[in-house]
Image: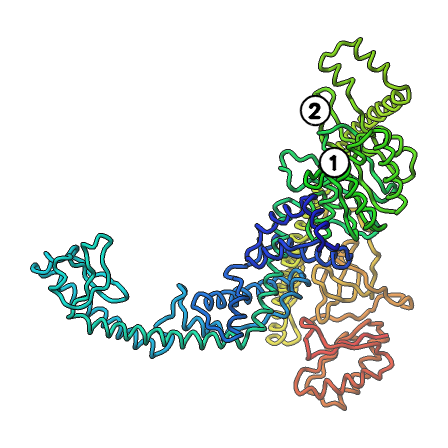
Amino acid sequence: MKTNSSYNQKILSTLDFHAVLQRCSQHASTSMGQERVLSLEPSGVFSEVKRRLQATDEAVNVERLKGGAPFGGIRDIRAAVHRARIGGMLNPVELLDILLTSQGGRRLKKFLEALHEDYPIPLLIELTEPMTDHKAIEDRIRACIDENANVADSATPELARIRQELRGSESKARERLEQMIRTPSIQKMLQENLVTMRNDRYVIPVKQEYRGHFGGMIHDQSASGATLFIEPEVVVQMNNRVRELKLKEEAEIEKILRMLSALVAEAADPLLVNVEALAELDFIFAKAGLAREMKATLPILNDRGFIKLKRGRHPLISPDSVVPIDVELGNRYSAIIVTGPNTGGKTVSLKTIGLLSLMAMAGLFVPAEEGSQLCVFDAIYADIGDEQSIEQNLSTFSSHMTNIIRILKEMTPKSLVLLDELGAGTDPAEGSALAISILDYIHRMGCRIVATTHYSELKAYAFDRQGVINASMEFDVQTLKPTYRLLVGVPGRSNAFAIAERLGLAKPIIDHARGQVGEEDQRVESMIATLEENRLKAEAERTTAEQLRLEVEALKEQLASERRRFEEQRDKLLERAELEAREAVAKARREADEVIKELRRLQREEGSGVKDHKLSELKSRLNNAAPELKKASKAPKKKPEVIGPGDEVIVTSLGQRGHVVDIVNAQEANVQLGILKMKVKQDDLQLVKKASSQTKTPPKATSSLKRTREDNAKMELDLRGANVEEAIIEVDRFLDESYLANFGQVYIIHGKGTGVLRSGIQEFLRKHKHVKSFRMGAYNEGGAGVTVAELK
């Protein structure tokens, strides 16, 4: 938006835009940020406005997440840097400001970069990218200037030496004078018993009549002349030495300040870049602060002339008294004609529409509900208020016409035109005709227009024109007060008769007055009254519907909450059940491992003849190790699987795979698990694979822990101690016997050793015609010392 002309600046002032900027500037942390806020102007470029609002939105999110950004210590150092660049010497205060600003900039950049990793703020990060680090200059200034903006003694060794000697000389001069004023004979000559300074030299206050008793120099006298401030001759040399040392101190300080100024001059350009970035960031965060104060929201932008304000509020009216307005313009209709009496809030509504549009175009959030839409116009024109000028000898009508003529010359189809009391200040008949003609011209141009008027003729105009709609400000006849609510679609009523009747005017007078009103006007008023009645009825129905909607949403939320609670309880129960199952399985496995360990020990101790009572005892221990899982009483019962001899199964309580040897009874079966054969309940078995259909009867030969040479067929072959050639012959014979016995899988025990025997056997198994696959034994099957072969 072009705002460099005085006319446009006048429009911004008329619509209270400058007042909004004043409030926004109060949220800036630096004078540089305040300058940028106060010079902010709306833009008519859609991409630029979108970028401005995105930057403000990022700053709003930073404030929401972190409570604000750290701008502490940042100063406007531009003048000092420019002076250093042309060779000027900076004072300690300016150098300290440069130090604090550089520190503050680095701290702010790190803060934003850290936040960007978790919550993207690309535009703010883009502003910090040109910023550079000046840690070396900071350290040098910090070493020379203390936090009170004084040159520190430690700045240079020479300054430290001079100041130490200076303090000693000052102490000697003061002590000599204090000795003098403590002497009784001298005290009577003094106006006061104290040592003071005049012209940077130590003196004592002497009465006028004793001026010749001390010698030395008179540096000053009191206003009355009764007191002379004399430097006694005995301390002249001491004061001379103090003065000499102070001159040396000043020279050394100047040398230090020039050295620091030269460092600043070398980094002048990058320092100025940092300052500009900091000023822009402060400006953006000031806009975020205003949004927080006004409880404003991010508007949806468009460039097609569409405005939709949801409960838009004028930002300069107190939140306790402001009445929100709902406005839609630019979709079904491009012009709104607001009619009705004064003091109803027409002008405030007009300003609210214009001001919120300007704020959005300037990158500011607007005080309206979420989802409000605003357009980026190329210009906003307004003729609001009484512009009468006595100096120019212009009437109210002439002043309005001058403004409107200028607007008609400058506006484009992408402009927003706001006209207050169009056609006022002249004859009603001519004024209304002129107003209709002006509105027709602007409407044909394609501009978006909102106009207020007193003329009742414009009510009919809005009904007769496509794309034009009536509006009015609501008035409560019962209380005789305006409600300041904008009613789009309902033309304004004069309410004069209703008000007069409420105030007590006699009914015959009112009836006579009604008779004076033309029939056409009475029909219009009757139509408006009907519209008003329908509006109130629709509004009541809408309120009821809104209450029902809120109740439904509350029920939905309650249902969702109960569902979430149910799912949480279910997850907890499942987690607890899974934990208990894991613990039960782990306990069973530990018990099984102990049984296997005990079996192996017995095998080593007693050879092949493990006694039956010991075997029964260990089998009982193994059966008892199976965990008893609780079953849900209401769970549907699974149809039991028919299990027969030779079937491959999984013992679910142990998680082990094996083969059914035979069926003991309807509830139990003997199952071969590796080298173990154990009795298992059938409901603890899960069928994996049925035995081959060729098998008519279960295998006659089964293995057991008690092995003898008379066994016809075995499921395991022990080859420990044999060489590869002998082992292959035995394996071949063993596989033939096992295949004929219809074993599903067999165990070949070769031991761990060097691995040569295992490799030879597995290579032979890989090519054998009866072998479907083979694998290394599991932990409870012998591990790497056993190869388990699955037969075809």
Q: Quadrant of residue 401?
A: top right
Horizontal and vertical percent position of residue 373? 77, 47
User: Height in image: 566 above or below 31?
Assistant: above
Assign a secondary structure to mark 2. strand
> Is 465 situated left or right of 570 in this image?
right
Amino acid under disc 2:
Lys
> In the image, residue 190 lies at what x, y percent?
14, 57
Quote the CA–CA distance across marks 2 and 1: 28 Å
For disc 1, the marked residue is 396
Q: Residues within 10 Å of mark 1 (few under 14, many from 20)?
A: some
Q: Is residue 725 visible?
A: yes
Tell me which residue sits at (63%, 52%) in the image: 288
Where's residue 66, x and y in %? 58, 55
Q: Amino acid at mark 1?
A: Thr
Q: Please, is residue 309 above or below residue 747 in the view?
A: above
Q: Quadrant of residue 772?
A: bottom right
**Which residue corresponds to mark 2?**
481
